[in-house]
Structures are given as structure tokens and as C-alpha cells.
Image (cartoon, rainbow, N blue to C red):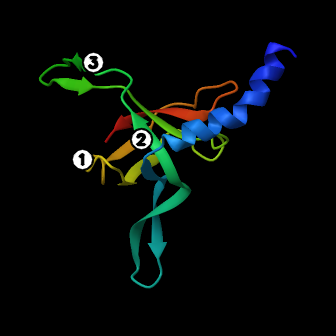
């Protein structure tokens, strides 16, 4: 066996382990204004790309502060892990809404996908997100 074959053989087990750690339920999609013929108005509608289990993780508790003129902005890295194989369904700038979580503070929070998922043979698709 080669190392590549060993990794390939272990991947299903690694994916199952990753999914067992996904404690949040999320909805991922894009918001668009759609014309409603019945009301004659535009209505914000969510086109869902994925709905199911996920995991939000803060890889570092470090908060970066930026000080543009007249304001202070703070940002913190957040990673959204989704079951492997969803990288093509989820797009940059999609909106992520946490619909259920053991951490009640996360329920209802929204994030934006800000980059592509980590590449390679992975046990989960890991997307960088930013809080909205």
C-alpha cells in the first residue's frame, strides 16, 4: 500500500468522524429580490443551496481591530464545516443562517461565505465565513 492508498481507505471513516462533530443545523443560500405578481412588489427570497448539519468553529479567539478614519472595526476568523462533497453546491457570498445549535447564542446568527473551501482530500468542506 502507498500513502495515497492508505489515505483513500481512511477517508470514509474520517468523513464520518467529522460529520459526528457537526452540532449545528444551517441553511446556506443566496438572497435575491424576486417580483411577486400577486402583490406587484419585489420580495426578498432565499434560494437554498444546502440545508443540514454543519459546524461553526473559531480557530482562534484573536480579534483583529482595524481603524479606518472615524470608526473601529473588529473581525474574527470563523470556519464553517459542511459534509464533504458540498464545495460545488455552496458559493462565495452565500448567506449562512444557523437554525439550530447546542449553543443558543448561535441560533439565528447569519454569516457570509467569504472564500472557497479548503482543497485536497478532506474529511469536510471547510469554508471561511464572516459574521453579518
Disc 1 or 2, which lies upstream in sequence?
1
**Residue drawn at x 48%, y 43% as measured from the top left:** 22
Residue 48 against residue 3 in the figure, above or below? below
Which image quadrant: the C terminus?
Answer: top left
From the viewer's perspective, is 45 left or right of 106?
right
- Asked if disc 1 and disc 3 are in contact, CB closer than 8 Å, the reply is no
**Residue drawn at x 58%, y 45% as measured from the top left:** 90
Residue 28 against residue 47 in the figure, above or below? above
State the residue in front, 9 or 44: 9
Of the numbered discs in the image, which one, if any, rests on residue 62?
A: 3
Disc 3 or 2, which lies upstream in sequence?
3
Of the numbered discs in the image, which one, if any, rests on residue 50?
A: none
Of the numbered discs in the image, which one, if any, rests on residue 105?
A: 1
Mark 1 or mark 2, whichever is nearer to me: 1
Residue 65 against residue 87 in the figure, above or below? above
State the residue in front, 18 or 89: 18
Amino acid at each position: 500500500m502507498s500513502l495515497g492508498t492508505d489515505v483513500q481507505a481512511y477517508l470514509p471513516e474520517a468523513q464520518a468522524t467529522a460529520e459526528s462533530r457537526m452540532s449545528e443545523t444551517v441553511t446556506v443560500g443566496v438572497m435575491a429580490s424576486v417580483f411577486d405578481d400577486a402583490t406587484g412588489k419585489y420580495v426578498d427570497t432565499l434560494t437554498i443551496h444546502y440545508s443540514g448539519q454543519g459546524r461553526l468553529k473559531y480557530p482562534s479567539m484573536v480579534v483583529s481591530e482595524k481603524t479606518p478614519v472615524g470608526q473601529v472595526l473588529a473581525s474574527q476568523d470563523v470556519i464553517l464545516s459542511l459534509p464533504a462533497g458540498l464545495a460545488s453546491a455552496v458559493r462565495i457570498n452565500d448567506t449562512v443562517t444557523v437554525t439550530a445549535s447546542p449553543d443558543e447564542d448561535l441560533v439565528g446568527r447569519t454569516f457570509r461565505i467569504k472564500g472557497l473551501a479548503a482543497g485536497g482530500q478532506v474529511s469536510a468542506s471547510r469554508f471561511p465565513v464572516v459574521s453579518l
